[in-house]
Amino acid sequence: MTQGPRETDETRCLMTFSACTATRQAVCPGCGTTSGRIHGGYRRRLADVAVSGHRTVIDLLVRRFICPAQECGRRTFVEQVDGLTKRFARRTVALHRTLEKIALALAGRPAARLAAHLSIPTSPNSLLRLLRKIPDERLRTLDPTEARCTGAHPRLTI
């Protein structure tokens, strides 16, 4: 007796949105020159913030443009969608920010458990890597005058 394909939790709870860009031109990130010459294109799969408890993936068709400037070091470049994509990223900007905030609040395993509960599966190591990439100026340091000891059992309160 043969069985058909089984539906797993991972495939059942996945929402995929297909999209493509509508621009005819893009600006080269290397030199700032506008180009309309298309070299090719490919699909990017970007993980996004969960929708109604379902994992979300954006299947985005992007194009690679040829830079017309001879002095530019880049021969080709890929168009980026503002507020959605970053170079080499597999997550949307919104998901990246969400994971950063979860990692800042909990770090490691507790953060990964909360992310999984929010339908954003990730590993504790990935969250710790996100924390290490945050520039120091974005992190708030504790001023010694803000910390005080109170109560019968002195403890640090912030």
Image: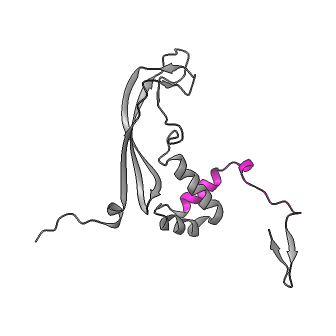
Residue at point 47% right, 22% down? 75
Which residue ends up furthest to the right in the rendered image? Answer: 145
Q: How is the image coloured?
A: one colour
Q: Position of residue 157 (x, y in %)?
A: 80, 72
Is 127 covered by the magenta stretch? yes
Residues drawn in magenta? 125-144
Q: Is residue 95 left or right of residue 20?
A: right
Quadrant that contains the C terminus: bottom right
Residue at point 85% right, 64% down? 146
Depicted 8 relative to depicted 47: above or below: below
Quadrant that contains the N terminus: bottom left
Residue at point 49% right, 64% down? 118
Q: Is residue 134 left or right of residue 16?
A: right
Is 105 covered by the magenta stretch? no
Q: Position of residue 119 (x, y in %)?
A: 46, 63
Type of secondary structure dominating the magenta stretch: helix
Q: Is residue 19 left or right of residue 83?
A: left
Which residue ends up furthest to the front in the rendered image? Answer: 52
Depicted 136 relative to depicted 28: above or below: below
Q: Is residue 118 left or right of residue 141?
A: left
Which residue ends up furthest to the left in the rendered image? Answer: 1
